[in-house]
Amino acid sequence: MKIFFWFTLLFPILAVPRSYSAQRPPSESVDKPMQEALRVMKLNREQKDKMRAIRQNFQERMKNLKAELDRSRDELDRLLDTGADDEELKKTFNQLQTTRRRLEAERFHKVLAIRSVLNEEQKMTFQSKRKEIPRTTESNEKAAEFRSE
């Protein structure tokens, strides 16, 4: 019963291969729809410079968090393969979830940083364009990347 529980809980996390994120350059990331939304807003030179700095700043942090997430998944895989005890599995799974939350927080802070550069009209355009972007979980993003390659 415990094995079934862990399998159903962890399968969505472990089923998606992890090598996709390393294969795509940052400029071709899943963030492309967001970049397109920003393009149609007719940013001035100062705003473009600030957006470039925001993207570079968050890109590095996101890259590091994604690498940490991959390491956590690998560790969880290793523990499952070696028959580790439930407590060790729970601890590693909690670390994985914490990293996921940090990744989501970074995405949210990026949106706030972008909004801070925009005027009111651009914020409204940005928000409407954001609503057009399909919401995806990280697993769905990676699966979409896999299908497109």
Image (tube, grey):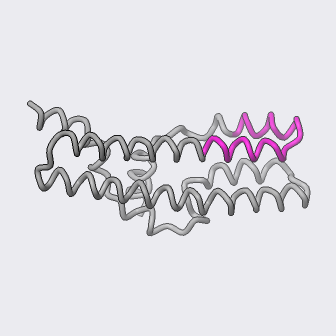
Drawn side of residue 5 relative to residue 9, left or right? left
Q: Who's the residue at 35% across and 41% down the image?
A: 94
Q: Position of residue 104 (x, y in %)?
A: 54, 42
User: Is 121 included in the stretch rendered in magenta?
Assistant: yes
Q: Is residue 112 above or below residue 149?
A: above
Q: Is residue 72 above or below residue 93?
A: below
Q: Nearer the viewer, residue 125 or 100?
A: 100
Q: How many numbered marks are there?
A: 0
The answer to which image quadrant residue 69 occupies is bottom left
The answer to which image quadrant residue 9 occupies is top left
Drawn side of residue 142 relative to residue 113, left or right? left
Q: Position of residue 149 (x, y in %)?
A: 41, 64
Q: Nearer the viewer, residue 67 or 47?
A: 67
Q: Position of residue 114 (x, y in %)?
A: 75, 47
Drawn side of residue 128 relative to residue 13, left or right? right
Check the image and name the residue furthest to the left: 1
Q: Who's the residue at 40% across and 62% down the image?
A: 20
Q: Is residue 120 above or below residue 37?
A: above
Q: Who's the residue at 28% across and 49% down the image?
A: 14
Q: Who's the residue at 56% across and 56% down the image?
A: 62
Q: Position of residue 31 (x, y in %)?
A: 60, 53
- The boundaries of the magenta stretch are 107-129
Q: Quadrant of the N terminus?
A: top left
User: Is 57 included in the stretch rendered in magenta?
Assistant: no
Give the prevailing secondary structure in the magenta stretch: helix
Q: Nearer the viewer, residue 36 or 3?
A: 3
Drawn side of residue 49 relative to residue 130, left or right? right
